[in-house]
Image (tube, helix red, strand yellow):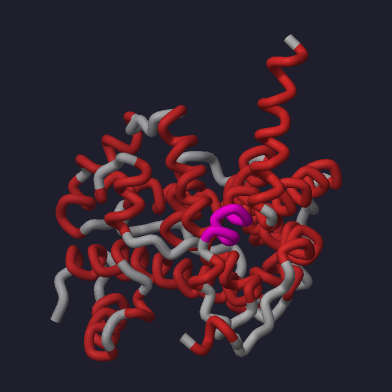
Amino acid sequence: MFTCKQVSNALSKEDYEKLSPRRRFFLRLHVKLCVFCGKFNRQVMEAQDMCRCYKQHEEKVLEQGPTLDPAKKHQLKALLAAQSQPDCCHMSASNKNSESPSQS
Amino acid sequence: MPPKDNPAVPITPLEQWVEAYSDYLYRFAMSRLRNPEAAADCVQDTFLAGIKALDRFDGSRDIKFWLRGIMRNKIVDQIRKSVKENKVDIEAEDEALLESFWFKYSGIATTNPDPWQFNPRKYYDNSEFWVVFEKCIAQVKDPARQAFVLRVLEDQTTEEVCKVMDVTPNYLWVLLHRAREQLKVLLESNWTGKDAK
């Protein structure tokens, strides 16, 4: 059987659903019966359940979220194009370097 | 290795990455960082890291999820950067909690926390509830929100979060407790308004 502190430590370190079935059983039992930490740790477990459930819905929820600024997208596209053609990129960089002294 | 030459899931050409994935990644980054500039940087860093590591992509799942996996590290980096700029100092109230009898004896904050004003379990299948939940997470104050994001949403271990935020495991416990507390209060005020009961 766990002590209150062990239960709290286990809950603070890990989602209780990730514990082994045996540990989960004793943890649930303790939280159900304990007059000291029961109320508090039951809320911690409920919060863990809620967050786990939220993560399953998250992708759908975030579909309504903000989108990236079109100017930033344009910038990103240029950056990725330069990255995917490294030779081209080096050439243009070397061209720029060769141009700059003549300009000065 | 055969999966690299002929992956199960076709790799989207690089020139289509921005159109295909930038909004998806940006939304995730915004939900974690709440800062448009940091989120945009995060997307850019993810794409660049993705290009560099593309030969390690095994094609077992959609590249979108693979990029999302890379972004997990970028989000941690951004939070580390933000924590370095605004160092997490322990508040007097939190210090008192850590020194309290109940915490030392049983690792809890109080034996009698306020009960929920409504039963959230009833709404787990309601997508509108999760939209409100997401908005409530955004309103939780830093550094509790950052601790919550790293530990709960990004699934980092306690040790990793303590390292990133430069706090002790006990203080991380307090931060997560504060995040849970605030989330409960916010949910109660934001959801019960349109609760059909």
For the view shown, which residue lies furthest in the top direction?
A: A104
**B130 or A30, which is in the foreground?**
B130
Query: How many numbered discs sit on the rendered protein?
Result: 0
B190 sits left or right of B66 in the view:
right
**B36 or B127, which is in the foreground?**
B36
Which residue is depicted at the point 45% across and 70% down? A48
Magenta range is B46-52
Q: In the image, residue A27 lies at what x, y percent? A: 26, 79
A65 sits left or right of B32 in the view:
right
Q: In the image, residue B149 lies at what x, y percent? A: 50, 54
Q: In the figure, residue A85 lies in which quadrant?
A: bottom right
Q: Is residue B79 above or below residue B48?
A: above
Which residue is depicted at the point 68% across and 45% down? A89
Most prominent secondary structure in the magenta stretch? helix
Q: In the figure, residue B107 lies in which quadrant?
A: bottom left
Which residue is depicted at the point 52% across and 68% down? A51
Q: Locate the C terminus of chain B and report the quarter of the image it occupies.
A: bottom right
Q: In the image, residue B131 lies at what x, y percent? A: 72, 63
> Can you see residue B192?
no
Q: In the image, residue B114 lies at what x, y percent? A: 46, 57
Which residue is depicted at the point 64% across and 46% down? B39
> Can you see residue B132?
yes
Q: Is residue B133 above or below residue B126?
A: above
Residue B47 falls within the magenta-colored stretch = yes
Residue B21 falls within the magenta-colored stretch = no
**B12 or B72, which is in the foreground?**
B12
A96 sits left or right of A32 in the view:
right
For the view shown, which residue lies furthest in the right direction?
A: A70
